[in-house]
Amino acid sequence: MRFASLAANGHNTQPWRFSLAPAQVRIMPDFSRRTPAVDPEDHHLYISLGCACENLSLAAEARGRQAEIAFLPENSGSIRMDLATSQPRPSVLFDAIPHRQCTRSEYSGAAVSPADLSQVEAAAQVDGVGVIILTERAKLNSVRDFVVHGNSLQMDDKAFTAELKDWIRFNPREALAKRDGLFSGCTGNPAIATWMGEALFPVIFGKKGENDKYAKQIRSSSGVAIFTGAKANPEHWTRGGRSVQRFALQATALGMKYAVINQPVEVAQIRTEFAKWLGLGAARTDFVLRFGYGKPLPMSLRRSVADIVVHV
Ligand SMILES: Cc1cc2nc3c(=O)[nH]c(=O)nc-3n(C[C@H](O)[C@H](O)[C@H](O)COP(=O)(O)O)c2cc1C
């Protein structure tokens, strides 16, 4: 359960509960942790469940339990994992689980070798999910323009910024008390008192400053990976999450860092333009990340296993 909870998830809300039965685990959505402003369709919520599912499956395999995964739309989109006994199968992806993080800093700009690019692409293969990797500078500049446009619209959206502020943990005391949300240290920002963070939020998160930061971060990155789903429904979103998590773990194992630049999929109007630019037809763009090389930042916290497990 601990390995599962270390998965990437939107705003670090950890929108999951795990129910345990002999030889079976169910991963259930925790709708009390929805983020309706940024994620009105629960798309990110189901991507996050997929990320946790992949970690749990890798951990189970490493410990001698082969996981068979089924999506249960009739149970609010829970994921059932039946765990059969098998030979333990440790993997580099499993070993990378505690080291993976979203690293929201400028990277070194160094190129990733074609062999390593093929390896992350191969690791991310999941049925129903497409992965597009871009490294050409002109294309990365176009992605930057979509990100900056999306970010500008989000920064003008009061519901979006209010929700974001609610999930920011401005100092270690607040982060440790809640063990969820976005700790400022994980973004390389200094710790400040909660009242001050709330008061200064509009200044700290100004539109121009954030746009310039994203532009620089994308310029410093080696490439961008875009994940697409054959269908736009919760089951496919969990598949997308599994693919994203596998990509992230393989990248971590190869010494790379990554960060999410999801604005082109979060703003519906831009999502359509972005899909058109990619020449995607009916497929939905589910996730966008940048990757490269950089120094680690502090790890983000998770709630304790006791808080997320339900015994049946
Ligand atoms: C569905 C989803 C959406 C996310 N969206 C963003 C985003 O828009 N911006 C961002 O900086 N990080 C984003 N993240 C990264 C999460 O904030 C991050 O996984 C979480 O804070 C936990 O931190 P960690 O991945 O370093 O453990 C997203 C992650 C997921 C799975």
Image (tube, rainbow, N blue to C red):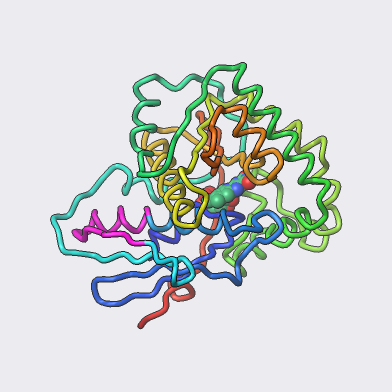
Residue at 26 percent across and 66 percent down: it is 82
Relative horizontal placement of residue 28, taking residue 214 as reference (left or right): left
Q: Residue furthest front?
A: 282
Q: Which residues are magenta?
A: 54-70
* Vertical position of residue 219 compared to residue 168: above or below: above
**Snapshot quadrant of residue 20:** bottom left
Residue 52 within the magenta-colored segment of the rendering:
no
Residue 64 within the magenta-colored segment of the rendering:
yes
Q: Considering depth in this image, is 272 or 247 the residue closer to the camera?
A: 272
Residue 90, position as x, y percentages in the image: 23, 49
Q: Considering depth in this image, is 256 or 79 the residue closer to the camera?
A: 79
Q: Which quarter of the figure is the C terminus placed in?
A: bottom left
* Vertical position of residue 191 compared to residue 84: above or below: above
Q: Which quarter of the figure is the N terminus placed in?
A: bottom left
Relative horizontal placement of residue 74, taking residue 277 as reference (left or right): left
Residue at 82 percent across and 35 percent down: it is 208
- Residue 217 visible in rendering: yes
Q: Considering depth in this image, is 67 or 235 the residue closer to the camera?
A: 235
Number of marks in the rendered image: 0
Residue 238, position as x, y percentages in the image: 45, 54
Residue 273, position as x, y percentages in the image: 67, 33
Residue at 64 percent across and 49 percent down: it is 185
Q: Residue furthest left?
A: 87
Residue 302, position as x, y percentages in the image: 51, 62
